[in-house]
Image (cartoon, rainbow, N blue to C red):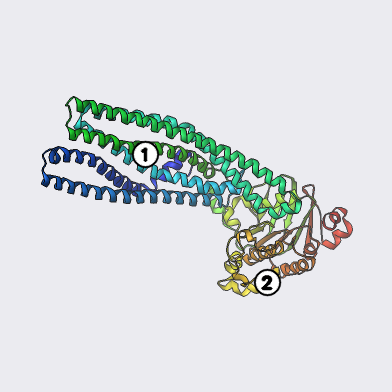
Amino acid sequence: MGTGKPSGRDVLAHAVRRQGRRLTLAVLLGAGHQLGEVAVPVLIGVVVDRALARSDGRLLVLWLGVLAVVYVALSWSFRLGARAGERAAEEAAHDLRVALVRRVLDARGGAETGRLPGELVNVATEDAKRVGAVNMALMSGISAFVGVAAGAVALLFVSVPLGLIVLLGTPALLWAGHLLGKPLERRSEAEQERAAHASGVAADLVAGLRVLKGLGAQRAAVERYRRTSRDSLDATLRAARAESWQTGLVLALTGVFIALIALAGGRLALSGAVTLGQLVSAVGLALFLLGPLEVFAWVNAELAQGRASATRVAAVLAAEPAVPAVPAASSGDAALPSPLHGGLRLRDVRLGSLAGVDLDLRPGELTGIAVTGPADAQALLRCLARETDPEAGGIELDGVPLTALDPALLRTAVLVAAHDAALFEGTLAENLGSWATTGPSLARHDHVLTASRADEVVRTLPHGSATPVGEGGRSLSGGQRQRVLLARALGAAPDVLVLHDPTTAVDAVTEARIAQGVREVRGGRTTVLVTNSPALLSVTDRVVLLDGGRVEAEGTHADLVRTHAAYRTAVLA
């Protein structure tokens, strides 16, 4: 779709262009089917005039054989054309899903801004499917147009007035269908937006179900979802009403059109201008035209919904990155420092509640960062992970500004492990990562599991590390999930590891053991513990206190507990 920001029209064009060969094959086969359908009433008229009217049995058998061949050909062309059209639709939807997932997973971020996870899932499924279906609609529409054109030409041979009625009336009918589809397009877009929002709210409620139960907030949460679901239902009903009106009116106009053709044909037969066989052919062609014209009504609805969904897909694909890419002119500076020592320097960093943080995270040191306000921790983690760049000030890795490094490259060296990171559908071993099952990393497998106390989780599961953990790790307790997440972060062995509250759901004894385990596993490599846990802070080389968005104090945990009241309040209260 190019390097610029795609529009809804660009998305549709890309979905069709990518399936050009398959779509062309589908159109040719579909057109062949329509030509066969046109040939049937024409041949029946020929049979009436040349065989039945003359009582010629040999000609009757001959023309019936020709009809049989035509039926076989149109049947196979329909099957193969429909198969090619459906394949084009599914392949286009698949390509869009891949593009959407690639954009959402882009290291620069930004696609998720202002959107719930469920909304993104809805765009990548329902909207992508509707855009892909445009290929099938185009195949059907072009084939139907060929059928109408062929029917009009056949009617011209039967009677010029009948042919002209079709040739002049069909464009007017198509234009009316297009105008009637406009309200459906608007309401379809609103329907998809409401449905996506409802999906997002539902996903959030399911993910936070335990917390909601603990807070006793189930009723408020259910009421919120009820309102959201009602809005989605209202939007769906409005779209359904628009679709029913559009389809009904187009079918009514189509019926009037066919009746006009039949009336004109009947008058011509009564006047002797056409033969009995020609009248049979004319009526058969008029009845045949009902099919293609009904297809036009369906195609208009599909295109209206496809355009609405394409606009939503384009909005995700065109979302501004949260952090900019490294400019091409400075790509020579985009390599990580070599050798990489892992020193981080923050100078006058300002973002959200951070009001000018100056901090050196020295190479190989285990540093604790305690905060008096959770917002400070969140803003700091976003900067270190380069989910966003500071509003002012800067951060350097071994003297290289983070803004000069590609975000994906940076994250191979600096891993920020959030306390609410996700586990995925699959086994526990698959969630730990490749280091747990393959290659030279197997040597540290047991060491990492022991340090994080995830080995205890493995022993309690029925099939050990081969046990499926369910979507989001819901088959595990909160403490088990935290230990698995910690093992995953430690096993990745990055040069710089930032851990955020990795032990909030474990008991005090386990927490103390984990603290010692982290220190042992990370010995000699830069590690940052963003936490107010005394057990974790006590094993660090140095603790930094952030208060009011600034560095308020530094020292060992024991010294700060003894000398600094704000620190005591933050970590011991």
Q: Is residue 288 above or below residue 414?
A: above
- Element type at mark 1: helix
Instruction: Look at the image and tell me in which quarter the N terminus lies.
Output: top left
Decide which of 59, 128 is in the foreground and name it: 59
Q: Residue 293 sits in which quadrant?
A: top left
Residue located at (41% from left, 48% from top): 89
Query: Is 447 situated left or right of 550 in this image?
Result: left
In the image, what residue type sits under mark 1?
Val
* Mark 2 crowd level (few <14, some 14–19, many ≥20, 10 Å Cα): few
Decide which of 135, 409 is in the foreground and name it: 135
Q: Which residue is mark 1?
A: 295
Instruction: Look at the image and tell me in which quarter the C terminus lies.
Output: bottom right
Spatial separation of the CA atoms under disc 1 and disc 2: 60 Å
In the image, what residue type sits under mark 2?
Thr
Task: Evaluate if marks 1 and 2 touch, with contact meaning CB atoms under 8 Å apart.
Answer: no
Residue 370 in the image, given as x and y percentages of width and height = 78, 56
Residue 411 in the image, given as x and y percentages of width and height = 61, 57
Residue 564 in the image, given as x and y percentages of width and height = 87, 55
Residue 350 appears in view: no
Q: Which residue is mark 2?
A: 460
- Element type at mark 2: helix
Residue located at (19% from left, 32% from top): 158
Residue 476's tag is none
Decide which of 51, 518 is in the foreground and name it: 51
For marks 1 and 2, the one nearer the N-term is 1
Residue 257 appears in view: yes
Q: Is residue 228 above or below residue 419?
A: above
Query: Is 423 situated left or right of 272 in this image?
Result: right
Decide which of 219, 554 is in the foreground and name it: 219
